[in-house]
Image (cartoon, helix red, strand yellow):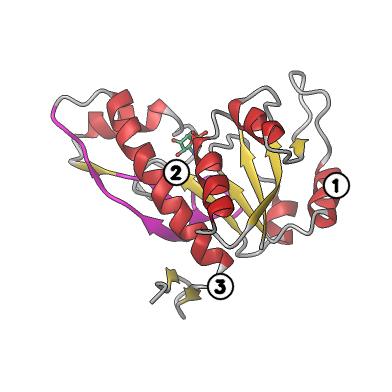
Amino acid sequence: RRLAVFVSGGGSNFRAIHDAALGGEVNGDVVALVTDKPGCGGAEHARGNGIPVVVFPKSKSAPEGVSIDELLNALRELRVDFILLAGYLKLIPVELVQEYPKSILNIHPSLLPAFGGKGYYGLKVHKAVIASGARYSGPTVHFVDEHYDTGRTLAQRVVPVLANDTPEQLAARVLHEEHQVYVEAVAALCDDRIVWREDGVPLIRSHT
Ligand code: GRF
């Protein structure tokens, strides 16, 4: 299956997914990298691996950005099946959500619905988790709808919040799990191993 990955930063989740696709753990090919930050680490990784980079949206810092129609055309021309958000910080336009029903995933570094929504990104998430006294945190892979972080949860992993954790230490512990849970979720998506329960909850059917 053909994947487009959307990033705004370092792109470690993008690299984990790309490595899993090259290694065959994910039955997919990353055919496009979309970013609002053409100089970011994710875009550099794409350029170094011959993956086309599409800049979206257009902004003062990214004047070469394309319009939503140009983005949709590029994704259609590349015959993209699934869209994977991985550290992409802009809201996904409703046109994109409508064009890719049940086909857009995102990873968020907390156990949604806790610590999700606009304003909760990067270290802010982990600072809030520590301040709350929560004993556990972890990444959530969820389907994307037209709001921030409110789509159907598909997969989660749990890590302990340790007594003297700094936000950076918790972020690193969660990020390590992100790479694994996202690869598992994308592998299931590419293998059509996602079952939608009658109440609308998506479940991963395991390999075996
Ligand atoms: C990660 O914490 C991810 O959960 C969030 O963006 C952060 C950066 O991820 N969505 P990456 O290293 O750019 O993949």
Indicate which disc residue 69 carries: 1
Question: Is the CB–ligand 1 distance for label 2 below 8 Å?
Answer: yes
Residue 108 tag number: 2
Which stretch did the figure color magenta?
138-163
Query: SS class of the residue under badge 3?
Result: loop
Q: Earlier in the sequence, mark 2 or mark 1?
A: 1
Q: Residues within 10 Å of mark 2 (few under 14, many from 20)?
A: many
Asked if one can make out residue 26 in the rendered structure from this viewpoint, the answer is yes
Three-letter amino acid code of the residue under disc 1? Asp
**In the figure, residue 36 lies in which quadrant?**
top right
Mark 2 vs 1: CB contact within 8 A: no
Q: Quadrant of the N terminus?
A: bottom right
Crowdedness near tag 1: few (<14), some (14–19) or many (≥20) residues, C-alpha within 10 Å: few
Per the image, is 108 magenta? no
What secondary structure do most residues of the magenta stretch adopt?
loop
**Three-letter residue code for mark 3:** Asp
Looking at the image, tell me whether mark 1 or mark 3 is earlier in sequence order.
1
Mark yes or no: residue 151 visible. Answer: no
Please give left or right for residue 176 compared with residue 201 in the image: left
Front-most of residues 113 and 84: 84
Horizontal and vertical percent for residue 177?
Answer: 35, 45
Tell me the mark number nearer the camera, choosing from 1 and 3. 3
Q: Label 2, label 1: how many angstroms apart (C-alpha)?
A: 27 Å
Disc 3 designates what residue?
192
- Residue 144 image label: none
Taking 156 as reference, is 35 left or right?
Answer: right
- Looking at marks 3 and 2 on the same chain, the residue that comes earlier in the sequence is marked by 2
